[in-house]
Every structure is written in C-alpha cells, then in structure tokens.
C-alpha cells in the first residue's frame, strides 16, 4: 500500500463531510493500514484523507469544560480521542487526516514536525511566511503591525498500533467569526488567521489542495529534510483547576 491521497466533500458547493462520519471513515482506514503489511523497502504506507467539515467544534483530551463555547452557533461540540485542546472545523478550511504507519526510525514528535513543515511550505508557496512556535503546536505567523502572533494551521494527532490518526487543518477562506465563540487551543495571547485574510484575496481549498498533496508526499517519504527555523518559544497555556465550593 503506497501513500494514497483521498478527497471527500471538496466539490464546489459541497457542504463537507459530517465529523462523525469522517471519524468512522478514519477508523475504517486505520484498521486497513494496521492490517496491511508494511513495504520492505520503507516506502510510505497509508492513506491521507483530505476533506472539509460543516461547522463543528472538536475537543481533544486536554480540553477543560470551561473552554467549550457557551454558544456554539448551532455547531456540534464533540469530544474526540486526539491530543490537544479545542479547535474549530468548517467550510473553507482544508482538513487532512494522514493515516500512515510510522517507520521505526520516525518518532511521533518527528512526524508532527514533518506535517507542520509541509504546511509551512504550502504557505510559503502562496507568499505567506510562517514557522513553528516551540511549546505550541501548529503553524504560526509572527506578530507584526497587523496583529499578534496568529495561528493559520492547527495539528492534533493520535497514534495507535504504530499508525497515525486525526491530523491538521489549514485555514483557507474559512469564516474567522467562528473563532470568537471560544479560545482556540486555550491560548489567550494570540490570534487566528487564514490565507485569504493574510493575502487580501480569496484563497480556496481548490487553490491549496495540490500544494498540500505535493508537500505531504515529500515530507512523509521519511527522507531527511531541512526544517524551517522556529520562532521564539512560547509556553503552553496552563490547565486551570476548577474548585468546587465547599471543598
């Protein structure tokens, strides 16, 4: 099984794939990748699902209850088994679920860095300079006269039986108003942006898709690569312990 790219719900005018249906599909593909023999020559082994979702908030294992939106605007709020905190998915955002077997020499953190690097290179190809912020997952723009540090792509994964699940989201022309309903990833000192907002023109999923496929194929071939230099490190936001009155 070579690295396969599969798109779902990306046709023009499509509403996207309901999150729970996509989660079921992930589990189905994950089981197939686990059961398939890994190529002896070390070639990439797995499937990347590329899609968009109707509006939905997904809450990773580190999400505290108070971080969930009080008014989700009609969108579902779903607890999921990936790492990280709460994030948003919606139309105009390319979501990728790489379901791939990790070679023995690739650690989980190395895999995450490769996915981040692929998205950094996509942004660079489109004229947007981004990098990692150590201590915070995802892909970021540096603070400038337009605003504070701001995230353009989010990452949250799970690894089971040596095969990855969940993945990334890249904001293309998503409605950023959704992010005002919660604190993305629990980070209060930074913002969220999109390719369209940064470039001042419409950048659609269709514009971005071939670039994402190209750079994922390159980085998930597991060859050595030159990583983009990081920005300054930032701490992860602390978890807040809520005290019950009378205790």
Image: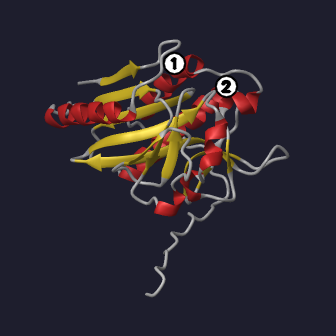
Q: Is residue 64 visible?
A: no
Picture quadrant where residue 2 is located: top left
- 33 vs 13: above or below: below
User: Residue 214 placed where, x, y %?
Assistant: 48, 23
Q: Which residue is situated farthest in the bottom direction here?
A: 246
Q: Residue furthest top?
A: 12
Residue 231 against residue 207 in the figure, above or below = below
Q: Position of residue 224 (x, y in %)?
A: 44, 40
Q: Tell how many labels.
A: 2
Residue 90 in picture, x, y percent from top left? 53, 32
Circle 1: element type: helix
Residue at the spot x=45%, y=34% of the render? 219
Q: Is residue 188 visible?
A: yes
Residue pointed to by mark 1: 210
Q: Which mark is residue 132?
A: none
Q: Nearer the viewer, residue 38 or 134?
A: 134
* Residue at numbered disc 2: 126
User: Which quadrant does the N terminus fall into?
Assistant: top left
Under circle 2, the secondary element is loop
Residue drawn at (59%, 37%), measured in percent from left and top? 120
Q: Residue at horizontal 57%, vertical 22%?
A: 208
Measure how far apart labels 2 and 1 are at the Cα level: 12 Å
The location of residue 178, given as percent across then percent down, is 61, 40
Quadrant, the C terminus? bottom left
């Amino acid at each position: 099984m070579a690295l396969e790219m599969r798109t779902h719900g990306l046709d023009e005018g499509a509403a996207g794939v309901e999150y729970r249906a996509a989660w079921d599909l992930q589990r189905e593909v994950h089981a197939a990748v686990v059961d398939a023999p890994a190529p002896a020559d070390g070639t990439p082994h797995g499937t990347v699902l590329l899609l968009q979702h109707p509006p939905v908030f997904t809450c990773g294992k580190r999400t505290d209850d108070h971080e969930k939106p009080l008014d989700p605007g009609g969108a579902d709020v779903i607890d999921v088994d990936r790492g990280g905190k709460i994030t948003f998915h919606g139309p105009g955002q390319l979501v990728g679920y790489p379901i791939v077997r990790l070679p023995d020499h690739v650690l989980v953190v190395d895999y995450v860095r490769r996915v981040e690097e692929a998205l950094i290179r996509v942004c660079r190809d489109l004229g947007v300079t981004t990098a990692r912020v150590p201590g915070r997952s995802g892909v970021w723009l540096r603070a400038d006269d337009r605003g504070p540090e701001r995230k353009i792509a989010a990452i949250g994964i799970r690894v089971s039986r040596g095969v990855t699940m969940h993945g990334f989201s890249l904001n293309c022309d998503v409605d950023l108003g959704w992010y005002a309903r919660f604190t993305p990833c629990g980070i209060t000192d930074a913002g969220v942006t999109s390719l369209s907002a940064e470039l001042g023109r419409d950048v659609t999923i269709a514009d971005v898709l071939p670039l994402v496929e190209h750079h994922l194929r390159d980085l998930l071939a597991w060859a050595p690569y030159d990583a983009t230099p990081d920005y300054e490190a930032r701490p992860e936001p602390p978890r807040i312990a809520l005290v019950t009155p009378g205790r």
